[in-house]
Image (cartoon, helix red, strand yellow):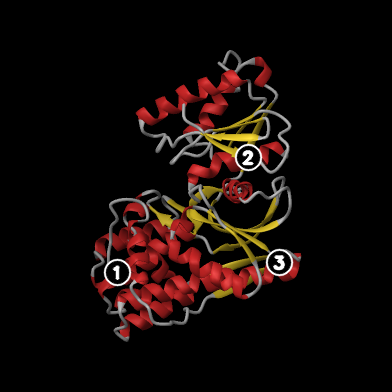
Amino acid sequence: MNFKKIKLPFRVKNAILAMGGQTKNTLCLTKNNFAYLSYIHRDLDDPSCLLAFERDIKYLLKCNPQILAYDLHPEYQSTKYVHRLSLPGSALPASARRKFSAVQHHHAHIASCMVENGLKNQKVIGVAFDGTGLGTDDLLWGGEFLICDYKNFKRKAYLKAVPLLGGERAIREPWRLAAIWLYLVFKDSFLKLNINFTRNIDIKKWAVLENMYLNNINSVFASSMGRLFDAAASVILTKNNAAFEAELAIKLERLALTYRLPVSGYSFKIIQDKNRYILDPAPIFKGIIRDIKKKRSKERMARRFHVTIGQLIQKICLILRSENKLNKVVLSGGVFQNKLLVDLTTEFLNEKGFQVLRHKNLLPNDSSLSLGQAAIANFN
């Protein structure tokens, strides 16, 4: 096997094998103060990828890891494999039966970036934006602001959750995401907005989705920044479907890069709920609709949307710095593969004196999860 060898910024107490996530899966073995990160197994629902994953685990188990770390999501194949290993008569060596460590998805994202930047165990503001990952409340997260170190985390702010109508199907049909956002913002009148996006909606299909929403049928709620990008892109680009996850978001970034003039961001709403903050993007969609009706260019709207998310990150980080006296901001999660968003966010945070930590050689997507899982398991 080929491994990426990574020097760890802390002492490793026990050998750890971390199982990674479901897609873009990697394995990570920590031993003698180094982490060894495997190649990517792509999607574990693919039988050939799962076979390679299981083969590589059997190879790494020969190193007698004393801790097995894995994602909280019970339906991930990597998690299921750990559960099978915990059963009597499994292939797991007796010396490795000491501990199983479940790790929250977004905490692992932030920890992976902390490791790559050489941080010892210290608290940071973590911004984890991705498609979805299971939260500690059994809901899907994906637009997260954490106060965390390697050992613990607190969820301090997050994107307002909306239903993924039809579950995973909403990823390939982003118009569903856009339609539910416009419905929540404009109610039934959204179909009368007289814009290209709403004119393209099949009324019969929308009636089915509305019924799903009103009766909570196959409607998993998710606070996902990745899905917010999909929804905004669907409205701006007037595209209903995507050939692969985040296709429309990628097109939106490319479009935004072509607009060179200064723009202001759209408005957004921050709701304080006790000691947490909920980010409501309803005003963003109102702003996009206003721009469409004013016949603003798609390039300009795409740029404004990216600027808005960067400004939103800046605003929440200012609040969290004031409350927690922290100045390091760590960016991770698949949404931060968007270079324009990373650059804008870094610029906005630097303006306010933050120290911004981002991935250098590793990708911010789920291929780095196992490294973060191993780091967290080491401190727990």
Numbered disc 3: secondary structure: loop
Mark closer to the chain start, 2 or 3: 2
Residue ranking furthest to the top: 89
Query: Vertical placement of 138 versus 165: above or below?
Result: above
Q: Residues within 10 Å of mark 2 (few under 14, many from 20)?
A: some
Identify the residue at horizontal 32%, vertical 80% (top origin). 292
Identify the residue at horizontal 47%, vertical 32% (top origin). 77
CA gap, disc 2 to disc 3?
40 Å
Question: Image quadrant of residue 145?
Answer: bottom right
Residue ranking furthest to the bottom: 294
Tell me: 362 left or right of 32.
Answer: left
Circle 2: residue type:
Lys
The residue nearer to you, when weighing 262 against 160, is 262
Tell me: 17 left or right of 51.
Answer: right
Residue 59: image x %, image y %? Answer: 51, 20
Query: Vertical placement of 327 versus 216: above or below?
Result: below
Mark closer to the chain start, 3 or 1: 1
Q: In the rendered structure, find residue 274 and report the number of the disc placed on it.
A: 3
Residue 174: image x %, image y %? Answer: 34, 59
Q: Residues within 10 Å of mark 3 (few under 14, many from 20)?
A: few
Mark closer to the chain start, 2 or 1: 2
Numbered disc 2: secondary structure: strand
Give the residue pinned by disc 1. Answer: 237
Query: Vertical placement of 17 versus 152: above or below?
Result: above
Circle 1: residue type:
Leu
Give the residue pinned by disc 2. Answer: 7
Residue 53: image x %, image y %? Answer: 45, 28
Circle 3: residue type:
Lys
Identify the residue at horizontal 47%, vertical 79% (top origin). 266
Q: For marks 2 and 3, give the one nearer the viewer.
A: 2
Residue 43: image x %, image y %? Answer: 40, 37
Tell me: 262 left or right of 314.
Answer: left
